[in-house]
């Protein structure tokens, strides 16, 4: 049985939090959502942080929160922009196996209806498609394992991950 952690990365809407909770139950691990950590420690929503400053500040806060994580036997669900921080990703790689939940663009677009209010750390001039393509490269770069989520429900994805870690 694995003693370290599992980190889930992927686009907003990929199911990291829900799959993470299911996976944690399968493995009898704890569960941490870094977006929730940020909101608790900042006492603000992700969107409020960006409205008060900018997306780069949100990414700095995210990096800071990830670097503080020092646990074992947890499933960690990261914000979609965690992959922009090499420091944060190296830290996660050192304490966990990183799983990329790959969901294709059309499905992500179908799932996310509140793109502009969701607290997604991106440039103002960046389209959702550009963001998707930019991040996909980074997710692939840092992942130890990619799960193609097409035609799978959250339970099935969690089960697949639990057999591969």
Image (tube, rainbow, N blue to C red):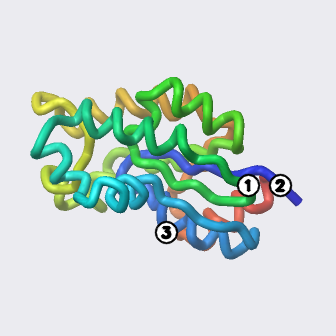
Q: Residue 89's image quarter? A: top right
Q: Earlier in the sequence, mark 1 or mark 2?
A: 2
Q: Is residue 100 left or right of residue 6?
A: left
Q: Earlier in the sequence, mark 1 or mark 3?
A: 3
Q: CA distance from mark 1 to mark 3?
A: 20 Å
Q: Nearer the viewer, mark 2 or mark 3?
A: 2
Which residue does the image show at 61% across and 28% down from the upper left? 90
Q: Are marks 1 and 2 in contact (CB under 8 Å)?
A: yes
Q: Nearer the viewer, mark 1 or mark 2?
A: 1
Query: What x and y, as percent, mark residue 37?
Result: 42, 57
- Residue under pointer 3: 18
Instruction: Please state, as top left, top right, bottom left or bottom right, where the N terminus lies in the image.
Output: bottom right
State whether residue 38 is above or below residue 65: below
Q: Is residue 163 left or right of residue 137?
A: right
Query: What x and y, as percent, mark residue 131?
Result: 29, 33
Q: CA distance from mark 1 to mark 2?
A: 7 Å
State whether residue 23 is above or below residue 52: below
- Residue under pointer 2: 3
Query: What x and y, as percent, mark residue 96?
Result: 70, 44
* Residue count near mark 3 (Cα–Cα under 10 Å), binned few <14, some 14–19, many ≥20: some
Which residue does the image show at 70% across and 34% down from the upper left? 94
State whether residue 30 is above or below residue 70: below
Q: Is residue 74 visible?
A: yes
Q: Residue 144's image quarter? A: top right
Mark 1, secondary structure of its residue:
loop
Mark 3, secondary structure of its residue:
helix
The disc at residue 72 is: 1
Q: Are marks 1 and 3 in contact (CB under 8 Å)?
A: no
Q: CA distance from mark 2 to mark 3?
A: 22 Å
Q: Nearer the viewer, residue 161 or 61?
A: 61
Mark 2, secondary structure of its residue:
loop
């Amino acid at each position: 049985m694995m003693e370290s952690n599992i980190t889930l990365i992927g686009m907003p809407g990929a199911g990291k939090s829900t799959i993470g909770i299911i996976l944690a139950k399968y493995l009898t691990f704890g569960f941490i959502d870094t977006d929730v950590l940020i909101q608790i420690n900042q006492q603000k929503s992700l969107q409020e942080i960006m409205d008060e400053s900018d997306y780069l500040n949100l990414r700095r806060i995210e990096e800071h929160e990830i670097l503080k994580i020092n646990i074992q036997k947890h499933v960690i669900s990261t914000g979609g922009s965690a992959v922009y921080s090499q420091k944060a990703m190296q830290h996660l790689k050192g304490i966990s196996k990183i799983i990329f939940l790959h969901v294709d663009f059309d499905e992500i677009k179908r799932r996310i209806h509140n793109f502009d209010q969701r607290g997604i750390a991106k440039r103002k001039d960046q389209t959702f498609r550009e963001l998707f393509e930019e991040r996909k490269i980074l997710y692939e770069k840092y992942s130890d394992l990619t799960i193609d989520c097409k035609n799978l429900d959250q339970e099935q994805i969690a089960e697949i991950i639990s057999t591969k870690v």
